[in-house]
Amino acid sequence: MVIVLIGISFITFALTYLAPGDPVQAMFSATGVMPTTDVLDQMREDMGLNEPLLVQYWNWLTSCLQGDFGTSYQSKQPVVSMLLARLWPTIKLALLSLVIMLVFAVPMGILSAVYQNKPIDYIVRALTFFGVSVPNFWVGLILIMVFAVNLKIFPVISSGGDLMSLILPACTLAFAMTAKYTRQVRTAVLEELHQDYVIGARARGVPERKILWGNVLPNSMLPLITLLGLSMGSLLGGTAVVEVIFSYPGLGNLAVSSITAYDYPVIQGYVLWVAVIYMVINLVVDFSYGFIDPRIRLKR
Amino acid sequence: MEKKQNFFAKNKTFTIFGILGIIVILVAIFAPVVTGGIDPTTGVLTDALKAPSSDHIFGTDKLGRDVFARVIYGARTSLVAAFCVVAAAFTIGTVLGVLAGYFGKVVDAIIMRVADMMIAFPGMILAIAVAGIMGASIQNAVIAISLVTWPKYARLARSLVLKIRDRDYVAAAIVTGSKTPYMLLRYMLPSAITTLVITAATDIGSMMLELAALSFLGFGAVPPTPEWGLMLSEGRAYMTAAPWLMIFPGIAIFVVVTIFNMLGDSLRDILDPRQE
């Protein structure tokens, strides 16, 4: 765990070294000034760029641990405050799209499993297939075209302030996820339906509805929790494309614009933050098993 | 011959989508023939943003380039790039995973820790950062996505090798003097390869989507390369005036990804009956 954290931070730091240009020049070109070589050399010395790689990494890491991720080349603001300002809109977007996704995926998955190989199952499966094969940025563009440009129900550009501007991006994100989750729910419920206790309950004449709602559904929801955790993590990063389409002021949009401007401190801060958040969420998911499923708690 | 016919008759989905997949590949290879010699990168400015007609069945873009030709040539870019990603991730992941599983101890620890680190980054983030920082090009996009995809294969290969590592017949082979390369190639690799190939086949579609997404963000193909993600990004500005710029590349992605997803799924059903 600690080793992985160190590795993550090192990879993040080393990202800068992949760049063809050097950071000092990038910094000046971000502000639009072209300095002399003397100034460039002086800047390199001041920023500690002449030190060996590992020394630079150590300096960077210690200041990160103190909460200082440097200042943006472009806006001259501290990276931390820039990231914090964008974090909440992204979380809001991610949560809303998860809710939308669950509202569709769970009922569809259950219906599809209970009526396995009936028409409704085929319809749901065709829909999910459609969902995983369509690029979600295309869905976003089509949604903008239909609902924002032609019907003018929603704003084209999502400021992130009100619910109305959240709906389209959230739906776009939810679209692909719904397909994935519907399949998962279907598989989980089907698996549970074939357990011996279900056959036993049926044999004893327990009403089908009671088996379904009382036993099968609660039991099949466990794998869903893991997935939800993982999705929350990847949503924090995966919203980038959708945020760009809707000009949504979230983390992903900030990252993309920083990359185009070679604003390294912001990129590093972003990648490190998201990776750490992702790890923490995975850890929380692992621990939450014990609370949800008594069997796992007893085994420990 | 008779046996072959049985196979195709039995696996109708696979046959249908296999044929469709081959057609897509053929279209990509023979793009100049399919488009009737229209060049996808030269445009006639006076023909800019023409709606679909008999001259340009998918219309033209802002530079007067034929969208149909660009969509067809785009298949080349997407297919080659997606196959490269899957091949690279598959090869690196399989080799490292098999080595980690077979040798254990230090080798295993090092390889798997590196894999853990790569997995700790949510998929697209690292790909975007790597592709973006190295500079936009289709090669860099391929490298970036391969870089974040190989750990999946490495983990899978390792777990499959571990399953048979301690079997008696493996121990017997070692005792009777089988050399290490022979052990790896004849015992370890074959036990893992089926599952890995299935994973690779089902991955082609999603890799295409990721590559298109990178290009869409401007971190993949660069103009004037005909690439579907890039075309969507270019067409975005003309959403209302020229919706065909968005509709046709989107449909192209959808159709091709569907074909390869179906192909991957049916291959899994054939090779791995347990999943049924």
Image (cartoon, coloured by chain):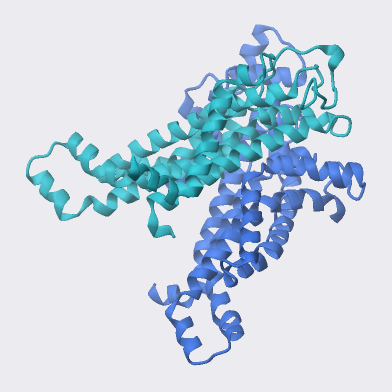
Q: Position of residue B241 (x, y in %)?
A: 89, 30
Which chain is painted in blue?
A
Residue at the farthest left position: B176
Is A72 on the left or on the right of A41, as rendered?
right
Q: Quadrant of residue A41?
A: top right
Q: Choose between B200 and B64: the one closer to the eye.
A: B64
Q: Choose between A272 and B218: the one closer to the eye.
A: B218
Residue at image position (69%, 17%) is B40
Residue at image position (55%, 31%) is B23
Residue at the farthest front position: B2
- Answer yes or no: is residue B17 visible: yes
- Answer yes or no: is residue A59 visible: no
Q: Quadrant of residue A297?
A: bottom left
| Above or below, B244 relative to B263 | above
Q: Choose between B201 and A227: the one closer to the eye.
A: B201
Residue at image position (47%, 77%) is A294
Q: Position of residue A128 (x, y in %)?
A: 63, 55
| Above or below, B29 relative to A175 | above
| Above or below, B87 relative to A94 | above
Q: Quadrant of the C terminus of chain A?
A: bottom left
> How many discs appear?
0
Residue at image position (70%, 49%) is A173
Is B98 on the left or on the right of B45, as rendered?
left
Q: Quadrant of residue B77?
A: top right
Q: Position of residue B193 (x, y in %)?
A: 33, 43
Residue at the farthest right position: A152
Q: Position of residue A115 (x, y in %)?
A: 60, 71
Residue at the farthest bottom position: A204
| Above or below, B202 relative to B24 | below
Which chain is painted in cyan?
B
